[in-house]
Image (tube, rainbow, N blue to C red):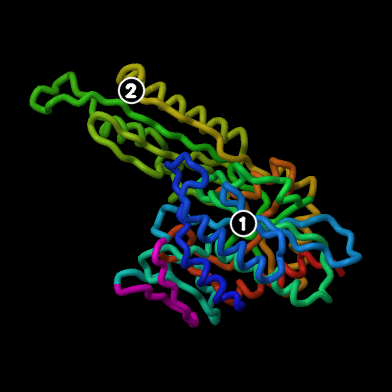
């Protein structure tokens, strides 16, 4: 199957995950794609392909007879962000010749606003209709891995060691490795295929935490509310205003951490705020969490104990210090890209990665590019040219000379 056909099939499945749902996976719809992947993997020759009760898809491509090498893992996630609808995606293929890309009469990807478009001149791109995300994050990675495995099965002359596969739910909620089985994904080391522009390699990420605030107000008829009403919406707004505007995602880059308000809902009696806290430096990360607690303490001192309740928990940690002792797996990826004429660049992930979870479970796991851009929004797109190149990269990455 052509990778474009494969990718378009995957994005036809709605697999949105949700931060405010406790069940795992957070949406049963992910099983529809998982079941499809199991059928497809078995059809191309992965006899042990299966999906477990948590929605993880596993399978193995056994080593070429006579080859002894460490088992390499390849992993990508099935779920998509809830920031924008992932239902009824209407992808379109175009040849990009420069300038703006009109998605619909009201929405365009403007070259002035998205300078990375310059890298894709002359490429075939898959874009949205401007009303949904695309799902290249991370169905492009899945398509590339499956296509690479299909190539290896069809070309037995390409020698390789044993390959472990895992396609998981809940990456977007930070829970992607929460129920992973290392007995089933039994890799010595692994690569997530979940980056963006071709040639990107990442082996450090944010330390991440999630903060949920519950604001308890007192609602009194506005006609008799003086010195009695505690409006939870106004208190919540004041709480948000306690966080430095310059330390929001819209004003940070590189190694700069941030506080990001994701959701705010409520009324005079009760309000709920969801926030994520991020920093690459562990000490600064701990300082940020301490500041969150001080804000809550201040609000409770001002408005009365119990006005604001806080649920603050860590999500993942920076994997750099645990990957660096195994830097040879990063260097291996660099060598493979460059041997195929691809310029590499190493950047910190301004987010999380399933690779961080795996790394802290004892499986070092850098992240590799997919060819996608503008994730989590209606302007998301993926380069067909870069997806095809990633098949070559993955084949060579797991092959044995």
Q: In this view, does 239 lie above or below 132?
A: above
Label 2 element class: loop
Picture residue at 47% right of the left edge, 51% below the top: 28
State yes or no: discs 2 and 1 in contact (Cβ < 8 Å): no
Residue 313 magenta-drawn?
no
Picture residue at 71% right of the left edge, 50% below the top: 184
Q: Residue furthest right?
A: 66
Q: Is residue 342 something one can see in this rendering?
A: no
Label 1 element class: strand
Locate residue 6 relative to residue 374 in the image: left or right: right
State how far apart marks 2 and 1 are (Cα).
42 Å
Residue 92 magenta-drawn?
yes
- Residue beneath label 2, please? 307
Of 211 and 170, nearer the camera is: 170
Region rendered in magenta: 87-105
Q: Residues within 10 Å of mark 1 (few under 14, many from 20)?
A: many
Q: Which badge, 2 or 1, comes first in the chain's sequence? A: 1
Q: Which mark is residue 167?
A: 1
Question: Which quadrant: the N terminus?
Answer: bottom right
Q: Residues within 10 Å of mark 2 (few under 14, many from 20)?
A: many
Q: Is residue 234 above or below residue 58?
A: above
Circle nearer the viewer, 2 or 1: 1
Of 203 and 316, nearer the camera is: 316
């Amino acid at each position: 199957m052509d990778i474009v056909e494969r990718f378009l099939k995957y994005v036809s499945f709605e697999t949105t995950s949700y931060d405010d749902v406790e069940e795992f996976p957070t949406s049963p719809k992910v099983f529809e794609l998982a079941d499809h992947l199991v059928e497809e993997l078995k059809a191309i020759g992965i006899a042990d392909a299966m999906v477990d009760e948590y929605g993880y898809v596993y399978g193995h491509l056994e080593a070429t007879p006579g080859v002894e090498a460490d088992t390499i893992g390849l992993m990508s996630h099935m779920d998509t962000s809830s920031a924008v609808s992932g239902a009824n995606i209407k992808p379109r293929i175009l040849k990009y010749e420069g300038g703006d890309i009109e998605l619909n009469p009201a929405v365009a990807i403007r070259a002035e606003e998205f300078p990375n478009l310059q890298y894709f001149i002359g490429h075939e791109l898959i874009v949205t209709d401007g009303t949904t995300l695309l799902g290249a994050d991370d169905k492009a990675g899945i398509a590339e891995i499956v296509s690479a495995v299909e190539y290896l099965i069809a070309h037995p002359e390409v020698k390789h060691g044993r390959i472990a596969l895992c396609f998981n739910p809940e990456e977007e909620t930070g829970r992607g490795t929460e129920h992973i089985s290392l007995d089933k994904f039994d890799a010595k080391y692994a690569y997530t295929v979940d980056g963006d522009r071709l040639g990107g390699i990442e082996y450090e990420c944010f330390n991440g935490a999630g903060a949920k605030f519950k604001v308890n107000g007192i609602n009194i008829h506005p006609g008799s509310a003086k010195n009695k009403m505690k409006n939870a919406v106004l208190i919540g707004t004041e709480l948000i205003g306690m966080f430095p505007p310059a330390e929001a995602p819209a004003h940070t880059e590189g190694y700069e951490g941030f506080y990001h308000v994701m959701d705010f809902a409520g009324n005079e009696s009760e309000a709920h705020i969801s926030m994520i806290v991020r920093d690459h430096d562990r000490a600064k990360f701990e300082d940020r969490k301490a500041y969150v607690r001080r804000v809550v303490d201040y609000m409770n001192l001002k408005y009365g104990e119990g006005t604001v309740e806080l649920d603050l928990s860590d999500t993942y940690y920076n994997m750099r210090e645990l990957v660096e002792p195994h830097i040879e797996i990063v260097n291996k990826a660099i060598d493979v890209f460059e041997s195929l004429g691809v310029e590499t660049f190493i950047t910190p992930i301004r987010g999380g990665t399933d690779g961080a979870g795996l790394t802290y479970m004892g499986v070092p796991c850098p992240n590799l590019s997919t060819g996608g851009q503008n994730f989590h929004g209606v302007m998301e797109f993926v380069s067909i040219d870069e997806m095809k190149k990633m098949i070559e990269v993955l084949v060579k990455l797991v092959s044995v000379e």
